[in-house]
């Protein structure tokens, strides 16, 4: 979800108009609503300082509004929170570790194929280069376990199937 969509979702949750949010952030009276509208529609992207102020006014963590990088644990958590809005998640214990399950047949199918590719890599059925090719070109490389031919060939040996 884009920054503007995140801002709008929380602004609506907080029952604020664009103008009210813009004024609270410190924008001029005659441009307050326009600036927020520009952020929400994606025609402008707020600079970090403005986004931090918006987060403060909306009483949310800054990380819940910005585009995550997925290289920090906190960013991964906010991504999972966002996914939970669209594909309700459940969290389970498995061998002493926490596992996330999506309540979506489609995502389950995607993850099952990914699991198979990781197993293929671990057992040497595919090379690291093939695995990377599969990921970089997914979903064109997906074959639904041999049910159809992938749109993009990723294996060095095309005759190899699951």
Image (cartoon, rainbow, N blue to C red):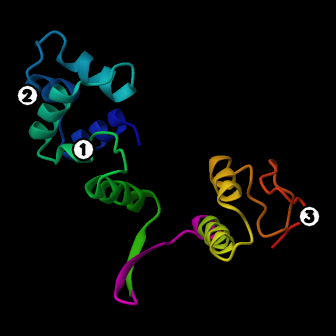
Eye-nearest disc, 1 or 3: 3
Q: How busy is the neighbourhood of tag 3: few (under 14 within 10 Å), some, or many (20 plus)?
A: few
Q: Which of the two labelled residues, at mark 1 and mark 3, occupies the earlier sequence position? A: 1
Q: Residue at x 27, y 37 (%)?
A: 7
Report x, y in % for residue 157.
Answer: 87, 60
Give the number of the disc on residue 159: 3
Q: Which of the two labelled residues, at mark 3 and mark 2, occupies the earlier sequence position? A: 2
- Badge 3 marks a residue whose secondary structure is loop
Report x, y in % for residue 112.
Answer: 63, 72
Q: Give, as a single range, the part of the protein colored magenta.
A: 94-109
In this view, the residue farthest toward the right is 159
Image marks 1 and 3: residues in contact by CB distance under 8 Å:
no
Q: Is residue 108 shown in magenta?
A: yes
Q: Is residue 126 left or right of residue 35?
A: right
Q: How busy is the neighbourhood of tag 2: few (under 14 within 10 Å), some, or many (20 plus)?
A: some
Q: Which of the two labelled residues, at mark 1 and mark 2, occupies the earlier sequence position? A: 1
Q: Measured along the vertical axis of the image, is residue 87 above or below residue 82? A: below
Q: Name the residue carrying label 1.
A: 10
Report x, y in % for residue 85.
Answer: 39, 58
In this view, the residue farthest toward the bottom is 95
Q: Name the residue carrying label 2.
A: 24
Report x, y in % for residue 82.
Answer: 37, 54
Image marks 1 and 2: residues in contact by CB distance under 8 Å:
no
Q: Return the residue nearer the eye: 141 or 133.
A: 133
Q: Quadrant of residue 76?
A: bottom left
**How far apart are the two marked residues, 3 and 2, measured between alpha carbons?**
62 Å
Q: Residue at x 74, y 53 (%)?
A: 141
Q: Return the residue nearer the eye: 62 or 97.
A: 97
- Badge 2 marks a residue whose secondary structure is helix
Q: Residue at x 30, y 37 (%)?
A: 8
**How far apart are the two marked residues, 1 and 3, measured between alpha carbons?**
51 Å
């Amino acid at each position: 979800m884009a920054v503007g969509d995140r801002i709008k979702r929380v602004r609506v949750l907080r029952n604020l108009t664009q103008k009210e949010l813009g004024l609270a952030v410190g924008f001029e009276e005659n441009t307050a609503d326009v600036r927020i509208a520009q952020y929400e529609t994606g025609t402008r992207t707020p600079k970090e300082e403005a986004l931090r102020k918006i987060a403060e006014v909306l009483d949310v963590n800054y990380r819940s509004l910005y585009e995550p990088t997925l290289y920090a644990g906190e960013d991964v958590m906010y991504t999972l929170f966002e996914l939970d809005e669209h594909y309700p998640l459940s969290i389970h214990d498995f061998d002493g570790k926490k596992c996330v399950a999506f309540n979506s047949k489609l995502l389950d199918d995607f993850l099952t194929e990914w699991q198979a590719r990781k197993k293929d890599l671990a057992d040497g059925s595919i090379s690291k280069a093939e695995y990377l090719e599969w990921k970089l070109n997914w979903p064109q490389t997906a074959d639904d376990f041999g049910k159809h031919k992938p749109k993009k060939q990723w294996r060095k040996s095309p005759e190899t199937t699951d």
